[in-house]
């Protein structure tokens, strides 16, 4: 499985070098970050080109990065304070997300 995932990532990097800003493999999944103005073109290629042949959108999620890295998640006393990387790492993230990159969309394809 790992070899297939790495091969897919390599194909994505090559094919979408101009349309993407990042492509990486983590925990057995490929993440391709696409420039917003290229989204339609990339999605059409992922579906229509036989080398990719993605056939189904299985999930869609919106993300607001407004407080990312600036504040801890609010939790109840019953939830661990250390789970899911809750600690604020402002020195890493606070300035990394400029206003124009505040919102994001994640497409999970099969």
Image (tube, helix red, strand yellow):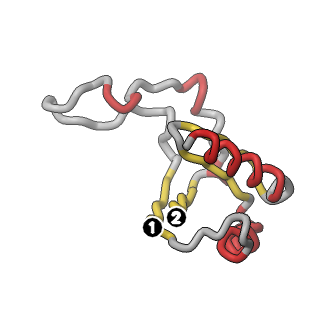
Q: Identify the residue shown where x is 29% and y is 37%.
A: 74
Q: Earlier in the sequence, mark 2 or mark 1?
A: 1
Residue at image coords 86%, 56%: 18
Q: Assign a secondary structure to mark 2.
A: loop
Give the residue displayed 48% in from the left and 41% down from the top. Answer: 67
Q: Nearer the viewer, mark 2 or mark 1?
A: 2
Where residue 105 appears, x then y in whole percent? 55, 60
Q: Nearer the viewer, residue 82 or 28?
A: 28
Marker disc for residue 58: 1
Residue 106: x %, y % from top left: 53, 58
Secondary structure under badge 1?
strand
Q: Is residue 77 left or right of residue 42?
A: left
- Above or below, comparing residue 96 to residue 39 in the picture: above
Residue 110's tag is 2
Q: Are marks 2 and 1 in contact (CB under 8 Å)?
A: yes
State the image quarter where residue 95 is shown: top right
Of the 4 image quadrants, the one containing the N terminus is: top right
- Residue 48, by quadrant, is bottom right
The answer to whether 32 is drawn above or below residue 94 in the figure is: below
């Amino acid at each position: 499985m790992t070899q297939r995932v790495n091969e897919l990532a390599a194909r994505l990097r090559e094919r979408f070098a101009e349309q993407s800003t990042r492509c990486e493999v983590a925990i057995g999944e490929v993440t391709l970050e696409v420039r917003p103005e290229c989204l339609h073109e990339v999605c059409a290629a992922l579906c229509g080109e036989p080398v990719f042949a993605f056939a189904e959108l299985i999930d869609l999620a919106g993300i607001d990065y407004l407080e990312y890295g600036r504040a801890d998640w609010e939790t109840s006393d019953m939830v661990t304070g250390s789970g899911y990387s809750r600690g604020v790492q402002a020195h890493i993230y606070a300035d990394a997300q400029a206003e124009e990159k505040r919102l994001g969309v994640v497409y999970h394809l099969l």
